[in-house]
Image: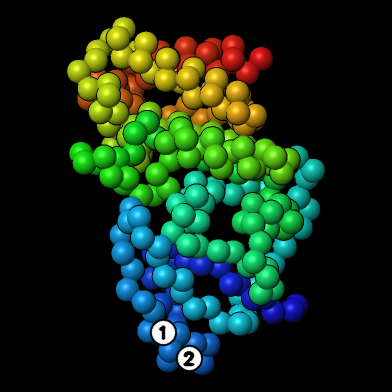
Amino acid sequence: MRKVSPRLSLDPIRLKVYEKHCASASSACSPAQTLLPALTPTATKEPIPTALIPEESDFRVNPVEGLGPDFIMGADVSMLKQIEDNGGKYYVNGEEADALEILKAHGVIWIRLRIWNNPTDENGEPLGGGNNDLETTVSIAARAKALGLKFLLDFHFSDWWADPGKQNMPGAWEGLVTEALNQAIYDYTAEVITTLAEEGAMPDMVQLGNEVNSGMSWPVRYKDRTCRQLPALQRVVRRITS
């Protein structure tokens, strides 16, 4: 199998993995390449320095045999716009190319994008992690749809990461209870889907909540209320998308 040239710019997490690789495989990295530039936080507005990547790598991914025609080959690209805004670039065999076009050329047919209500801190500064508000989501989704990729939208119903250990309601919804909270969630869902449709970026699949094992919209909405809310949200999505 031929060697590949993975000239991808790295975000801070993958950069740490690369540093570890260089430390344990000195033959693959020159001393200059192991002395990577210091990184600033992901929320910075200044470009993050691009890591030096070896011209060739022995890294290989073997194909999976016997996949059916309905198999979904997908990638979460929620970080894409922030990486690009910070100077990140993507390459194929030394030639710069669009990241989504690279994915499509290598068999990806779906993308996933998470969406947060208002991913900013108390000073209005972006939190990082992709800064996936509605504007960012529309931007990436429209690019993907223009390439013929299908699009899964993942609602977190939070200003930041939602998972089984934290399902904090957005700051704009704090203090709302019962019917007022139900209406806020309903209106927000309808606004997002309608906006995407108007921008030619209608999602092909919608995930209502992220890892909602322990409910969502804490501290008000726990498992029983979440179970009652989800069918209503399904109805609003189907009404707009049909």
Left or right position of 211 against 57: left
Which quadrant of the structure image shows residue 171? top left
Residue 100 versus residue 28: which sits nearer the camera? Answer: 100
Residue at x 58% of width, y 72% of height: 7
Quarter of the picture holding the C terminus: top right
Kind of residue at badge 2: Ser
Residue at x 26% of width, y 40% of height: 124
Left or right position of 137 against 146: left
Q: Is residue 62 visible?
A: yes
Left or right position of 119 against 109: left
Residue at x 46% of width, y 32% of height: 134
Kind of residue at badge 1: Thr
Residue under pointer 2: 30
Q: Which secondary structure, mark 2? A: loop
The residue carrying pointer 1 sits among few (fewer than 14), some (14 to 19) or many (20 or more) residues within 10 Å by Cα, namely: some
Q: How many marks?
A: 2
Establish if 199 lies above or below 18: above
**Residues at badges 1 and 2 in contact (C-beta under 8 Å)?**
yes
Residue under pointer 1: 34
Q: x and y percent of residue 149 in the render?
A: 69, 41
